[in-house]
Amino acid sequence: MLGTGESWIQAALKGLELSFQGQAVGVTAFSEELAHWLLAAADYVIVPSRFEPCGLVAQCGVRYGAVPLVAAVGGLKDLVQPGIGYTLRPLRPPGDALSHRADVDGLAELLRRVEMEAGTYTHRSMQRNCMEAELSWKKPAVEWETVIARLSKKHAS
């Protein structure tokens, strides 16, 4: 795992690193170069965000063939189409322990499903679909230009 966050999360990451020496590393800083190396080596990129306007981490992972496992919010919801990753049900707002538990259970259930598909034709197809996905602004730009042109014609009439 890579990144910064609340101090208790960083401490937990370091604890996991100590518990699983040689199997897990928690880098509590940000390095763009290391982020690219990690995404290039990853089979999956997990982004269970409650709020994610764009989904850049998942988009970068998709470029490298890291299959995204994401919450159905913002840009993440737009990124994961059929054959390109997995979507969690929307996460509940932070609050009571029951909501938190249901979100954790949902993520665990999805991870079990993904684990069963790892290395299969389905997984390899998703990786290929990810790397071939069209993530440029070409299509949205044309759609936006069409809307603007339509509005301009209406206004001119």
Image (tube, rainbow, N blue to C red):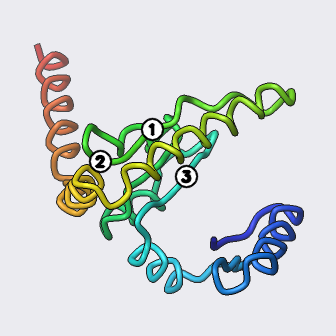
Most foreground residue, 129 or 109: 109
Query: Type of residue at label 3?
Result: Val
Query: Type of residue at label 2?
Result: Ile
Density class for disc 2 (Cα within 10 Å; few <14, some 14-19, many ≥20) is: many
Most foreground residue, 99 or 148: 99
- Residue in view at x 25 percent, y 49 percent: 122
Disc 1 to disc 3: CB gap under 8 Å: no
Query: Where residue 146 is drawn, which disc sits there?
Result: none
Marks 2 and 3, the one that precedes in the sequence: 3
Pinpoint residue 48: horizontal percent, then vertical percent: 59, 46
Residue that badge 2 annotates:
84
Quarter of the image where one finds residue 140: top left
Pinpoint residue 12: horizontal percent, then vertical percent: 83, 66
Could you tell me which secondary element the residue under label 2 belongs to? loop
- Residue in view at x 31 percent, y 65 percent: 65
Pinpoint residue 72: horizontal percent, then vertical percent: 49, 35
Tell me the quarter of the image containing the C terminus: top left
- Residue in view at x 49 percent, y 78 percent: 38
**Residues under labels 2 and 1: Cα distance?**
10 Å
Residue that badge 3 annotates:
47
Marks 1 and 3, the one that precedes in the sequence: 3
Residue that badge 1 annotates:
87
- Residue in view at x 27 percent, y 60 percent: 127
Residue 38 appears left or right of 63: right
Tell me the quarter of the image containing the N terminus: bottom right
Q: How many marks?
A: 3
**Residues under labels 2 and 3: Cα distance?**
14 Å
Query: Type of residue at label 1?
Result: Thr
Looking at the image, residue 119 lies above or below residue 83: below
Looking at the image, residue 73 lies above or below residue 133: above
